[in-house]
Image (tube, rainbow, N blue to C red):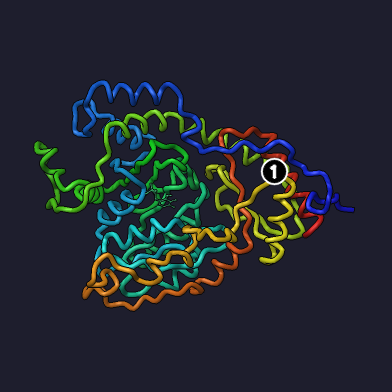
Amino acid sequence: MAERLAIDGGTPVITEPIPSGMHGPSVIDDREINAVTEVLRSGKLFRFVENSNVAAFEQEATARLGVNHALMVNSGTSAIICALTGCGIGPGDEVIIPGYTYIATAAAVVGVGAIPVIAEIDESLGMDVADVAQKITPHTKAILPVHMQGVPCRLEEIVSLARAHDLKVIEDSCQCVGGRYKGKYTGTWGDAGAWSLNYYKVISCGEGGLVFTDDYDVYELAAFASDPAMPMWMSDKEWANQPFSRQCYRPSEILGAMARIQLSKLEDILGHTRRLKKAFLSELADDPKGYIRQHVDDPDGECGISAAIIVQDDQLAKKYAEALKAEGLGAGTAYNQGFPDRHIYCYWDSILKKQSAHPSGYPWNDPAYKGNVEYSPDMCPNTLSILGRALRFGFNVNMQEDHARLMAAVINKVDAALG
Ligand SMILES: Cc1ncc(COP(=O)(O)O)c(C=O)c1O
């Protein structure tokens, strides 16, 4: 006999709220406060100063990631834009992105004048490699995989597909800062990677981003894309490529100082969240009746900041979500009534309607574009089906392992009754 659910008048499993909070911002202490204060007191807020914090952050990130070059910018979106530019992506090019990612991924592609092509996801909640293969056209120049909620996608297969078609890979690792895949950091598998350091991310400096790559040319072109005056600020440097003018995504020393301290806390944050996820999984039933677990290609490397279960059908998923809530456990679902989730492609209105910043209708009407991409809200039915059945849970540094076990116990109870 399954235990009576709280929604049916039973006793809720969770009686004290599970602690909430962001990752990086939750661990801010005197070290960040002092580092930022020191910059303010020095009055030297511009990144091109002696002993620059931004430059030091770039070096420290380079060493941690084991890459040759890193460039700090002012957001994850600008990091993707600079990475795309660094890889030579521009007008006329199609870039394949998953249908489940923040709208910024698609916007970055549009930002360089290229065309986002939207591919399905699979039970990994990352790109469906078979669908990506089908969406390659003569205009495709790059694949842009995204590691959502700290879980690396099927990176090895994606990179080998890209190489077989001579395509670039730009990894959106904005939600997977510090995540590893088969021993190598996410973002370092392709031609360039991007981190976001915004408020919601694993480490944060409020707003910020990082582009990283092994390829010097990619780095240099990304650097030009980040600051039209780069050759002026670095006038003693010999450039290998011809400088060009673009937007300005330059970060300040305040961001650099805070990012350095947060980077030094990255492994502690992830050590904690990975322990939470392990505790959660060790409690979760091995033989659930009504759902499957999200496929995680490399459980050792993931950040441990999220877990997802995929229920058999969407009606049942709604029932699970309601029952879990009554037990004290909120789940992320695709049914945010009245609040369009910009992480799901069908809510990317400006992309689906090809809304341009200019009457010319670029990038879709750009004469350089010879393809005919079409969008519609139902163009990726598998993505909508999976997300419609997925229930997502988050782990954060304010939680203890007992909280994670309790979350799993709630899911076990609901599954035993409804599955
Ligand atoms: C997957 C993904 N890509 C890109 C971005 C853009 O990062 P930012 O907000 O720092 O511009 C985000 C931010 O939420 C994200 O989640």
Q: Is residue 69 visible?
A: no
* Point 42% across, 37% down: residue: 204
Instruction: Please state the horizontal and vertical placement of residue 159, each as a whole percent of the image.
Output: 41, 58
The answer to which quarter of the image holds residue 109 is bottom left
- Number of marks in picture: 1
The answer to which quarter of the image holds residue 305 is top right
Q: Amino acid at mark 1?
A: Met
Q: Secondary structure at mark 1?
A: helix
Circle 1: is it few (<14), some (14-19), or many (20+) Cα within 10 Å?
many
Instruction: Please state the horizontal and vertical placement of residue 379, each as a whole percent of the image.
Output: 48, 74
Taking the image as shown, residue 208 lies to the left or right of residue 123, namely left
61 shown above or below 316: above
Q: Where does label 1 land, which residue?
A: 407
In depth, the one of 164 and 295 nearer the eye is 295
Taking the image as shown, residue 201 lies to the left or right of residue 41, namely right
Taking the image as shown, residue 135 lies to the left or right of residue 305, namely left
Taking the image as shown, residue 295 lies to the left or right of residue 350, namely right
* Point 72% across, 40% down: residue: 406
Instruction: Please state the horizontal and vertical placement of residue 184, each as a whole percent of the image.
Output: 44, 44
Which residue is most to the right? 1
The answer to which quarter of the image holds residue 144 is bottom left
* Point 31% across, 50% down: residue: 78
Quadrant including the C terminus: bottom right
* Point 33% across, 69% down: residue: 355
Q: Is residue 341 visible?
A: yes
In depth, the one of 16 and 48 nearer the eye is 16
Instruction: Please state the horizontal and vertical placement of residue 381, each as a whole percent of the image.
Output: 55, 72
In depth, the one of 104 and 360 nearer the eye is 360
399 shown above or below 99: above
